[in-house]
Amino acid sequence: MHTILSSATTTVRIGPDQPFAIIGERINPTGRKLFSQQLRDGDLSRVETDVAEQVAGGAMLLDINMGAPLADEAALMRRTVTMIQGLTDLPLVIDSSIVEVLEAGLAAYQGKALVNSVTAEDERLESILPLAKKYGAAVIGLPNDEQEIPDEPARRLELARKLIRVATDTYKLAIEDIVIDPLAMPVGADTRHPARTLETIALIRDEFGVNMTLGASNVSFGMPDRPAITSAFLPIAISHGLTSAIMDARSPQVVRAVKAADLVLGRDDWGASWIAAHRAALARGDDPPRPPREDISHHQAAGAT
């Protein structure tokens, strides 16, 4: 099953037989005080840098969130979507919890966008799914409702089932235009959270075969050496059925991890993308990853014998 997203000139397919879709997370003021203030001042100068860095890092789509406190989020979303379409041909993910902001972004967008996001709450389904239908957008669905963000994978599956049923039966969205977020919670809060997410991914894959995404940085929130945790989690999630993630495309360690997963899972024919990326890194003068010193010593010792 392929979720097809597009800009005016470029199409991206998300699917289990496709390269893992890297959705750049950086254009978001959360945790960025200076960027938040710039947005309140109507200053979008930082967006150009964020776009360039994520494109260079390997992003295939870009998530756009303008949720700075006290800012005119709808006006900012409209301006930013228009601006970014002049900077890159990557498809966009329109990200807001406010319906009016989502519509402002969708109205300004040329192509088929991904809406981030809708929950299984009745009120949210009734307000956001018609918007996705109106603009021909795909939508990310989160399996939580008015009562809870459930821990149990079986309950998450139940809510995903509701969300998919309402979207397809009531609002006539194509099932391939529904991308489920299985809910990645911080390992630092409960070390069982990642296992619950992995089980949820497998359950949703087995029942529906829909594409899935998640906020990859959520997994490592509050922990030291966050890229290492994310780099360990994502390949496992990919093997369970995850097909995309909203992630830091500027992190070479994390990007290499998902590219390596594509290679070993047979989604990179003859390793062409892996080899091309390695050559490009060498051309830029990047230092290739090296084994730890103790591993080098071990191999040297083995060779000496």
Image (cartoon, rainbow, N blue to C red):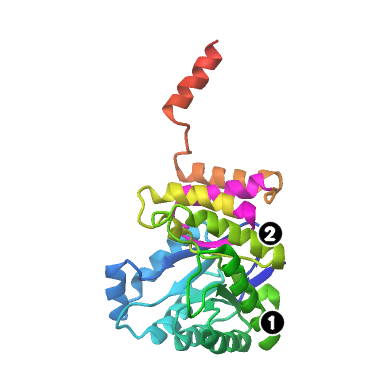
Q: Is residue 243 among the parts visible in the rendering?
A: no
Q: Position of residue 300 (x, y in %)?
A: 50, 18
Q: Residue at x 62, y 72 (%)?
A: 158
Would you place residue 264 above or below residue 1 in this image? above
Q: Please give the range of residues in magenta.
A: 238-265
The residue type indicated by label 2 comes to Pro
Q: Secondary structure at mark 2?
A: loop
Label 1 with label 2: CB-CB less than 8 Å: no
Q: Nearer the viewer, residue 301 or 6?
A: 301
Horizontal placement of 42 versus 264: left or right?
left
Find out whether residue 245 is within the magenta segment. yes
Q: Which residue is mark 1?
A: 168
Q: Secondary structure at mark 1?
A: helix
Q: Residue at x 47, y 34 (%)?
A: 290
Numbered tag placed on residue 208 in the rendering: none
Horizontal placement of 214 versus 188: left or right?
right
- Crowdedness of circle 1 by 10 Å Cα count: few (<14), some, many (20+)? some
Find out whether residue 97 is within the magenta segment. no
Question: Which badge, 1 or 2, is on the more N-terminal residue?
Answer: 2
Q: Position of residue 205 (x, y in %)?
A: 67, 62
Q: Position of residue 50 (x, y in %)?
A: 41, 65
Q: Nearer the viewer, residue 288 or 284?
A: 288
Q: Residue at x 53, y 82 (%)?
A: 121
Quarter that holds the C terminus: top right
The residue type indicated by label 1 comes to Thr
- Crowdedness of circle 2 by 10 Å Cα count: few (<14), some, many (20+)? many
Q: Which residue is mark 2?
A: 16
Q: Which of the 4 image quarters holds residue 143?
A: bottom right
**Tag in front: 1 or 2:** 1
